[in-house]
Image: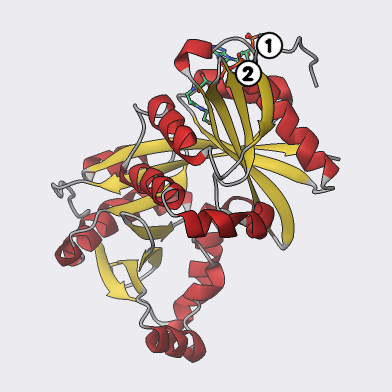
Amino acid sequence: MLQRNIPGKRGHIRPLDSNRDLNPVADLIEVCFASTLDQDGRDYLRHIRMTAADPALIRWLPGLGERASSPLFGYVWEQDNRLVGNLSLIPIKKNGRWIYMIANVAVHPDYRRRGIAYELTRHALDHVRARGVPSAWLQVRDDNFSAYELYTSVGFIERSRRSTWVSGHTNLGFSPTGIHITQRIPQDWTLQRAWLTHNYPPDTTWNMSFDINRYRPDWWNQFWYWLNGELQLHWVARRANGSHDTLGFATWEPVRGSTDMLWIGAPPESEDSVLCTLLPHIVHAMRDRRRPIAVNYPYGHGVSSFLDCGFTLQNTLVWMEYPCN
Ligand SMILES: CC(C)(COP(=O)(O)OP(=O)(O)OC[C@H]1O[C@@H](n2cnc3c(N)ncnc32)[C@H](O)[C@@H]1OP(=O)(O)O)[C@@H](O)C(=O)NCCC(=O)NCCS
């Protein structure tokens, strides 16, 4: 790890104090992420401010320790009697082991390029190492050059890049001829599982709502979802030439937040025709919900098909790991 001079003499780092820092942190996040804040981001800020306004909850929070939800734990930078930098640390389980997510790294525009984010990140990594966890992870937008440079300079390594596509108001799709859409049958599961796992490998799904075991078509799963009132729908694209060869799958499910999710399983050779067939069909089928549909997809794949079907690129996130060992 690079060593640097400690920035600006008057500034200092300290642990976040949920009694007094939540509103200034929310203000800082709002200023620093103004250009990328979506509905989920605004809900998140509202949640922080509501927490700050609730004295009973604030009194209760310290008892939750580090496992409280972000940004109730982390470090802040104070300078000129202001809170000008923040970094949240979120312990989370990855494949059964506790790791830390680093989030909400933000430095007020008037205080940038003084090494504050670098010091916050170094300090957070000291904290992570001291807890003996194997790694720290974070996500950064691929167009956020300054943050990517920051994390690389501290020692983070890029592990994956995923794009999120969101359905638009207009359904521009077209259906390639020679393909028809059917329901899923239990015999489809072997192929569906293989293709879903190809597009959503375990090393990328630990931080998503994706769970391959949930989509198994066995009676217990179906019963369980029925019991819990949970909804899950599957579509299959098959060749219509008599062979009925399976070309790809789509699984829709509602999730918390402002969009519903669609998971696509298709091999590279039929990916585009599957997307062009299933996306418009599903957007049309789910129109009464009046909620956009989001697809998390490997970066650079299916781009023209998503655009042709009226989807827009919400973001591409780079996942980075700092291995502690
Ligand atoms: C990204 C951000 C946190 C950096 O804060 P900062 O305190 O200015 O960063 P530092 O001064 O500690 O910079 C450390 C290193 O990061 C890189 N870096 C930071 N800002 C950069 C920029 N504008 N252009 C290029 N590299 C940059 C450089 O490698 C820098 O080292 P150097 O100054 O020796 O060249 C700040 O710009 C910010 O708040 N941005 C908006 C919120 C955001 O995008 N957060 C990250 C979310 S993942």
Nearer the observer, 231 or 235 = 231
Q: How is the image coloured?
A: secondary structure
Q: Residues within 10 Å of mark 2 (few under 14, many from 20)?
A: many
List the residue tagged with mark 1.
Answer: 7
Q: Is residue 188 above or below residue 75?
A: below
- Residue 105 in the image: x percent, y percent? 56, 31
Q: Label 1 to label 2, Cα distance in Å?
A: 6 Å
Q: From the Cβ of disc 2, is ligand 1 less than 8 Å away?
A: yes
- Name the element at disc 2: helix
- Residue 276 in the image: x percent, y percent? 27, 51
List the residue tagged with mark 2.
Answer: 116
- Tell me the kind of residue under disc 1: Pro
- Left or right side of 147 for 63: right
Q: Is residue 122 above or below residue 132?
A: above
Q: From the Cβ of disc 1, is ligand 1 less than 8 Å away?
A: yes
Among the 4 quarters of the image, the one containing residue 135? top right
